[in-house]
Every structure is written in structure tokens, then in C-alpha cells.
Amino acid sequence: MVITRALPECWGHRGASALYPENTLASFEAAIRDGAEGIESDVHVSLDSVVVMFHDPALERTTGSEGLIRERNWHGPDGMEHLRTIKEPRQPIPTFAETITLLMKPENQHVKFNIDVKVQNDPDRLFSLMHNIISEQPDWESKLAPRILLGLWHPRFVAFAKAGLPYCRRSHIGVSTSIARKYFWDDVEVFSMSFASLVSVDGSKFREECKIAGKKIMVWTVNEPEYMMEAVRWGVDVVLTDVTKKWLDLRGALQVDYDAMLSRYGRLFLWTKWHFYFPAVLSFARATRMTLESAAGPFDHFVLPEPATMASRIA
């Protein structure tokens, strides 16, 4: 007998990025073909104000080209529009506009879109450019806006998101439950947390707090079956994964025989992996905060956006 259970959704981390070059239309399309309920990607802005889907601030790792995205033009003979990924099958870098076009196809209008807002961006400029593209779509307020989830690492970006994209849901992306509580609790409805940050006793407490408060939890980046099964035990809402088909196949098997499938995967790995222990988690959280603050300023002292209304921007 098949028992229907509420199991975590599958969102493709940079698409189906284990098989296709990350953050490309081919990767996004593959995740959607697999049956993923959502895709996740990252945004940066070029020198000539084109929003592109790319993880790193620099081009080298995935394209072999040089330079920072913010210092390179998209258009022109030397523009980034001509670059291709190193990984096969070689793909161009997609723009935000192209990705929105993909998601607005009739067959894709169920797919959710998690946008990882990188802290190297000027949030006012980025969100203005994004709004222009979003608001150009037909019936965007009902067919697109509800599917977009902004992912914010730095508290400075919260006020800009509220001012520039007030119709988009907001999440905090992070590696520290203490930072999530202190800086983001009242301003987001979703927490997108690293797997390691949720393993500890405090991670368990945070998961319970979210459940009581009606906050959703996404966990990343979950690629191994035993990790996926632990996320099921935790009762998270979304599994972010590079291997969308693997999680979807496991989820299908869970729907057929939940107890038998879950019993195949033990929990010993939680005590045998050094990076799940408190000193490692704390060290990584501190290093991450330092990186974020070096790019966007201190968490406790930052400049808020000038008062503005979306009415004037939309007009």
C-alpha cells in the first residue's frame, strides 16, 4: 500500500549540476525534467548592468576566463556573452532574463526559483535590475513573483530586498543558527541552512523553533543518500541537491515503503565526520562571517537604503 507522506521537495542546486555545468540553462532544464519542484542559482551584475547567473564573483573556475564579473562587460567583442563553460557539454552563461524566460514557459510555471544574492552585489542596483525584468513578464504578479525566493546572506540586504522587491519571499542562507536567530528571524520566512549547522543539539532546537514559528527550512547541499534520509528524519521542507534524480528516486521509494527505506540508512556518519563537530562548525561559521563582512560590511553597522516606494519604481 502506498502511503502519502509530506517529504522534502527537491530543488536543483545550481540546477542538476552533478551532470551538467552549474548555473546554466542546460542544468536548470535537466533539473526540471527530472521533476524538481525548484531550482537554485546565484546572481551577479556585469559592468554594463546585465544580471547573470553565476556563483563566483570571478570567472576563472568554471569558464577559464579572467576577471571579476562586475568589471567585465556582457556585450561586445570581449563580452561575457561569448564565454563557455569548461565542463562538458560546454554552455554559455545564462542571464537572469533568459532564466526567467525559461521559468515562464507554460510547462515550467510550477517551478520555484531560489536566487542566492551574492554579497559582492550593490543590492539597490541589483534589485532594481531584477525588478525591471520580472515586471516585464505577462501576469508577473500572479504567475512569477510568488515563485521567487530571495536568498540573503547579509543583514544589510534585508532592507533593500523589502524596498526593491517587496513581492518576493525572503530567506536567509547561512551556516550559523545563532546568526539566523539574531539577524534574520523577524524578516524572513525561510531558512536555507548548511547541513552541518543543523546536526547539533542546537541545530535540533533551531529546527523545532522554526516548526513552531511556521518557518520553512531548506538544507544544502545534500548529495549522499544517508544525508538525504537524515533530512527526512528532521522534517525539513526542501532538499537542495546537485543530484536531483537521486533524491527524487529515493523520495519515490520512501512513498512506497517509508519505514523499510529509512531503515537502510543509519546515522553513524553523524559521529564519524569531523566537520559535524562543534569546533569545526563554529570555525566555518566564523570564517564565513568574516568573508561576508569583508565584502558587505559589518553585520551590526551598515547603511540602510534611502526611503523609497515601489509605486514610484513601478510607475
Image (spheres, helix red, strand yellow):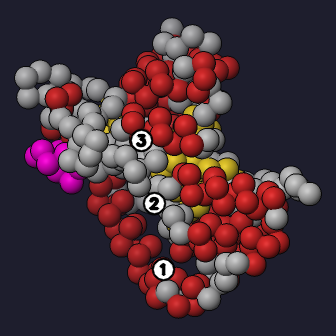
Residue 65 colored in magenta in the image: yes
Q: Which residues are magenta?
A: 60-68
Q: Which mark is residue 300?
A: 2
Q: Earlier in the sequence, mark 3 or mark 1?
A: 3
Name the spot of residue 219 as percent of width and height, x first: 59, 61
Viewer can see residue 283? yes
The reply to whether the magenta stretch includes residue 58 is no
Q: Which residue is under mark 3?
A: 27
- Identify the element where label 3 is drawn: helix
Outermost residue, left direction?
77
Q: Residues within 10 Å of mark 3 (few under 14, many from 20)?
A: many
106 on left or right of 47: right
Write down the quadrant of residue 192 in the picture.
bottom right
Residue at 51% across, 8% down: 315
Q: Residue at x 37, y 46 (%)?
A: 20
Where is 5 relative to 169, above or below?
below
Closer to viewer: mark 3 or mark 1: 3
- Tag 1, which secondary structure? helix
Q: Are marks 2 and 1 in contact (CB under 8 Å)?
A: no
Is residue 185 visible from the viewing direction of this image?
A: no
Q: Secondary structure at mark 2?
A: loop
Towards the viewer: 161 or 195: 195
Q: Is residue 67 left or right of residue 225?
A: left
Q: Amino acid at mark 3?
A: Ser
Question: Residue beneath label 1, please?
Answer: 281
In this orientation, which residue lies closer to the viewer: 149 or 99?
A: 99
In this rendering, the answer to whether 131 lies above or below 253 is above
Q: Amino acid at mark 2?
A: Asp
The Cα atoms of the two marked residues, 2 and 1, are separated by: 22 Å
Q: Residue furthest front?
A: 1
Say which of marks 3 and 2 sits in front.
Answer: 3
